[in-house]
Image (cartoon, rainbow, N blue to C red):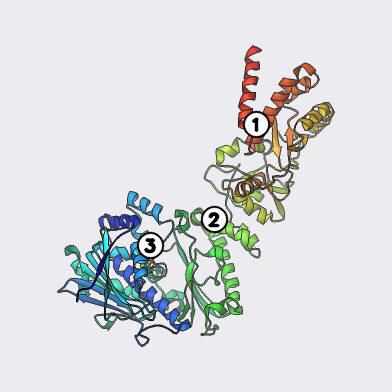
Amino acid sequence: MTKKVESYEYQAEIKKVLDVVIHSIYTNKDIFIRELISNAADALEKFRHISLVEKDFIDEDLPLEIKIELNEKSKTFTISDTGVGMTKEELIENLGTVAHSGSKEFIEKLAEQKNNEAKLIGQFGLGFYSAFMVSNKVRVFTRSYKKGSKGYIWTSDGISNYSISEEEGIARGTKIVVELKKDHEKYSEEFSVKGIIEEYSNFVSSPIFIDDKRINTVQAIWVKNKNEVKQKEYDEFYKFLTNSHSEPFYHLHTSSDAPIQMKTILFFPKENMEIFGFNRMEPGMNLYCNKVLIESKVKEILPDYLRFIKGVVDSEDLPLNISRETLQDSLIISKIRKFLTKRVISFLIDMAKKDEQKYLDFWKTFASFIKEGINSDFENREKLAKLLRFETSKTKADEKTSLEEYLKRAKEEQKEIYFLNGKNRQEIENSPYLESFIASDIEVIYLYEAIDDFTMSALSEYDKKKLVSADKSDIKIDKKDDDKKDDKDSKENYEKLIKWMEKLFDKDLEKVVLSDRLVNSPAIIVNPDDTMTQNMQKILKDAKGGMFPAGKKILEINPKHSLIKKLLVLVDNKKEEKLLTQITEQIYDNALFNAGMDLDKSRMVNRMNDILEYAINSK
Ligand code: ADP
Ligand code: MG
């Protein structure tokens, strides 16, 4: 009886992936073996879970294992597992489409640069297709664990189509037959394959057989003494855990007896996958009790903002029957979490002290996670703040400094730490908010990400010094005494002008005041709000579609600026009221613009034209 064979076309993204995989300069073809083992190991892990919570599944007596068969005659590499298997829908979904949301852009990048792909490909869930590096024909025999499931054969040449047909007599799990291309026939020889599998497979918790010989002894390197573990073993273990092909940035191997007995390896990766626009990383910690895996990717072991850290925790104090549900309320787990969080932070603080450059490499890639921590981890906020690095008005571009160093440089009288947000260094340096600080030799931290103000606001102070945005209204910068006398005189002179301006901007401004901070600019908008910077208000306003009511602002005018001095004269001259109004409105708009706030552009252009005409006529 001939079976019905249905043909499907790959999703466009998959075709691109396949094209990259097949034609790229992949030097290391070996990786396909790891990818397939990793998938088999995942499938077994998933099944092991399901078998604990569900009752209805097929082939319950099948042992949980991975088998590799090498056939030199037929030139095939075959790997089978007794894991979850796939239904027909899952075959189409998992092997015919890209599930990860950011993958499209990534694939495009991949196709362009063709250079880092080998180490990245596994982490983006494109692993299965690596089989097509060595094969023109891959067959997948699979049957889902679900009661009543049917068996299927999936076949493809890895170009544009795949087919699926139903098949009798398939047991639970998945078997993948890779027909090797002429140049890659060595993957059907035990001699070539064994070495590739050995190092890696020792971390797989299910048994792996090559042609019926068991090759892996499960190795729990974390229970060993640090001195007994070679760097290479750490690297291999990391690659296994993360399904990546690159070495970790750093690892931390510790054991402790109090407050609880536990052994841990924590890995810091080199890459930050979230930068590529991918989904949030999954938590990266696996939980063991006495070398038995209890649960992988446990979200309770480290706080969410440390999700980039990958590793294992093994504690004999844990009850073996602990389940996903009880993990949440486990006192032991919360102790582990507390302990490890502090350990990670103090480790990073230490690294920054000992090897600033190395720490800055880390900061460059993972800064956003530390900032996230400051926003969410109240308990460790102050310690995390030690990890912050910024450019400031006293560093060079691209040079970074810590809050601690900032305070060391500050004069003793300085009671606050100042920061200012802007798109880039140039924008901040041209900002009128900065000028008085520069004139008074007070350092200002430059923030380039919109979200940074929220971090500063969450932190609110460092070493008992308040963190203050430079656009805030009541900043007091110490001045020389003769300057102060000057101010007093001008106050009286300006009273009339200020009253007139306040009337003009009655709807928009809380008040108009004389500035004692401005140097070169005629006026600025300052923010009387104690909790939110102008930038934060703007973000909230944008996010809420303009519904967020920004508080009324204050206009500071610079009594020493010639433009403002001229206004003093105009305000006494009824005939010049139109010009006075237009210039004042323009000064106000310029200040709004500098504050990054919305202004009425069409009104401004008309007004500017009037002012230009006036200027040219007076020549
Ligand atoms: P990833 O493993 O990162 O998800 P892959 O390309 O390696 O990406 O695999 C794609 C998907 O195909 C897997 O997520 C899984 O759902 C399915 N899959 C692959 N191999 C197997 C297998 N041996 N058993 C069951 N499902 C599998
Ligand atoms: Mg995979």
Label located before the other in sequence (2 or 3): 3
Badge nearest the viewer, 2 or 1: 1
| Residue 260 on image: x %, y % | 58, 80
Identify the residue under disc 2: 368
Tell me: 268 left or right of 503.
left
Residue 549: which disc? none
Q: Position of residue 445 (x, y in %)?
A: 62, 46
- Alpha carbon separation for disc pair 1 and 3: 51 Å
The spot of residue 203 in percent (x, y) is 38, 76
Q: In which quadrant of the rendered image does the C terminus lie?
A: top right
Q: Residues within 10 Å of mark 3 (few under 14, many from 20)?
A: some
Q: Which mark is nearer the camera, 1 or 3?
A: 1
- Secondary structure at numbered mark 2: helix
The tag on residue 590 is 1
Q: Earlier in the sequence, mark 2 or mark 1?
A: 2
Comes first in the chain, label 1 or label 3: 3
Location of residue 608 with respect to 223 vertically, above or below: above
| Label 2 C-beta lies within 8 Å of the nearest ligand 1 atom | no
| Count of numbered tags | 3
The circle on residue 246 is 3
Q: Residue furthest left?
A: 73
Determine the CA span between mark 2 and mark 3: 22 Å
Q: Is residue 258 visible?
A: no
